[in-house]
Image (tube, rainbow, N blue to C red):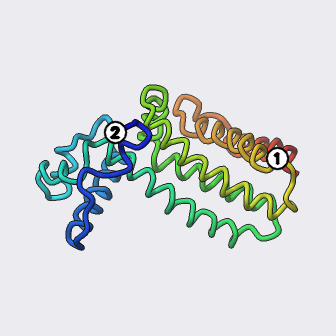
Amino acid sequence: MTKSTRREKPVNEPKQKRSVETRNKILEVGSMLMLSKGYHNVTTDDIAKAAGLSTGIVYHYFKDKKDILLIALDQRADALYEGFTEKFAATTEGNFEVFLNTLFDFLLEYHKQAWVIHEELEGLYHSDPEIAATTNKFWEKAYVSIAEIYAKKSGKPEHALEKTRMALDVIEDYCHACMNPIIESLDQDFMRQEAIIIIKSLLT
């Protein structure tokens, strides 16, 4: 089985309600542990213990902790960006600056909540093809979701997806600067205002 398809099927696809609930519990507990402690600081035994299950049960449903990570990333990407799209559609009517500030707030909060695993994924992205592919899929959802909203608000401009990608790179750099303790003394409000000027110039 190729790398691109190896993880599409769990070790044991559950069909009974109790089995589905057990698998979902492992996914939820595992993803929460990795989110709070980081991927490298969590073992399969840790996940089993936190879920109140045996390690053997975890391996019954998943190949390893990376399997849990990849499936959790897929699920969270879907849930995150469905809610994300609805939020922007509801809160940014007719005001492009409100749209941008909501976008900054959303992505900065994501970085705060997931900073440890975010940094680990940055490293794993360059060494693990499966994690790279899943991470690309995760961010593609972001680009497409935001580009669709931007296109609707701006009358379907040319190269909406490309412009959105460039704008998100600016916001990503801003978020990383805000999360870096070495540069806490930087004026984050000023940085955001200047970034918004750059993005508005690009998108309007």
Image coordinates of residue 93 in percent, x first then y, are 77, 70
At mark 1, the secondary structure is loop
Quarter of the image that includes the N terminus: top left
Mark 2 or mark 1, which has the lower sequence index? 2
Q: Are marks 2 and 1 in contact (CB under 8 Å)?
A: no
Q: Nearer the viewer, residue 18 or 93?
A: 18
Q: Is residue 105 left or right of residue 179?
A: right
Q: Is residue 72 left or right of residue 62?
A: right
Provide the residue designation for mark 1.
Answer: 159
Image quadrant in which you'd find residue 45: top left
Q: Nearer the viewer, residue 94 or 186?
A: 94
Which residue is outermost to the top?
Answer: 127
Provide the residue designation for mark 2.
Answer: 39
Image quadrant in which you'd find residue 168: top right
Image coordinates of residue 20 in percent, x first then y, are 26, 67
At mark 2, the secondary structure is loop
> For the residue carrying disc 1, how many other residues have a C-alpha within 10 Å: few (<14), some (14-19), or many (20+)?
few
Q: Nearer the viewer, residue 44 or 8?
A: 8
Q: Amino acid at mark 1?
A: His
Residue at x 82%, y 47% (from the top left corner) = 159
Image coordinates of residue 152 in percent, x first then y, are 80, 64
Above or below residue 75? Residue 163 is above
Image coordinates of residue 143 in percent, x first then y, are 66, 50
Q: Amino acid at mark 2?
A: Tyr
> For the residue carrying disc 2, how many other residues have a C-alpha within 10 Å: few (<14), some (14-19), or many (20+)?
many
Above or below residue 50? Residue 14 is below
Residue at x 32%, y 58% (from the top left corner) = 28
CA separation in Å, label 2 and label 1? 36 Å
